[in-house]
Amino acid sequence: NASFGAIVKGKYLYVTNFASNSISIADISNASSSTVVATSTLPASSGPYGIFAMGNLVYITENTSGKLRILDVSDPLKPQTTATITLGGAPSNLAISGNYAYIPIGTTVKIVDISDPYNPFVVNTISGFTTAIVRYSQGFLYISDYVVSTGQVKIYDVSNSASPTLKSTISNLDGPYI
């Protein structure tokens, strides 16, 4: 199985398994005897890829189905889907801050309001580049724009996620996977 994402939450490691459309959950409380304690199967052809944890929720991008899936992991051994939202394309990684998820898909980054884990919705889309990876820090979204000849990182002010503002572009990077 190809694993594209992993996140530690408490004493558990959650790993996305792209080929088997599942998530493995390992108890890592004892590093010398860590073991998989549960596997949560997702729908066929979902292609779980990126993963992020916050509170009792785990957010997973599904690269093949083009969705964001939200799981309640209050009981880490029995994660329950609270919602999915179809984003289209092939979402890869994601960054989350507060009530918003930032998800790169092809030439866009979708901004999803996740304040209600049962009813996420897209509030805005940033476009105009070939995204690879997004990172969030202190009100700013860093988007790697992989252009073979002139790799760039674009920096957006997302303090108001409904209206992101491009603040600067760092150019002439060699493959800006941030």
Image: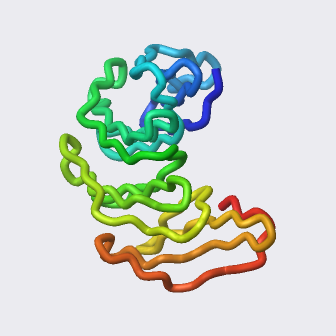
Q: Position of residue 120 (x, y in %)?
A: 24, 48
Looking at the image, which is closer to me, 107 or 17?
107
Q: Quadrant of residue 111?
A: bottom left
Q: Report the number of numbered marks.
A: 0
Q: Is residue 8 left or right of residue 53?
A: right
Q: Which residue corresponds to the image point at 27% horizontal and 52% vertical from the top-left?
A: 114
158 horizontally vs 47: left or right: left
Residue positioned 45% across, 28% down in the render: 46
From what the image shows, is residue 48 above or below residue 33? below
Q: Does residue 125 lie above or below 79 as drawn?
A: below
Q: Quadrant of the C terminus?
A: bottom right
Q: Residue at x 39, y 65 (%)?
A: 125
Quarter of the view holding residue 81: top left
| Quarter of the figure that contains the N terminus | top right
Seen as rendered, the residue at the extreme bottom is 167
Foreground residue among 99 and 147:
147
Q: Is residue 13 visible?
A: no
Q: Horizontal and vertical percent for residue 70?
A: 32, 38
Residue depicted at x 50% and y 26% = 29
Q: Position of residue 118 (x, y in %)?
A: 19, 40
In this rendering, does residue 101 appear at all? yes
Q: Nearer the viewer, residue 42 or 28?
A: 42
Specify the color scheme: rainbow
Q: Position of residue 147 (x, y in %)?
A: 72, 66
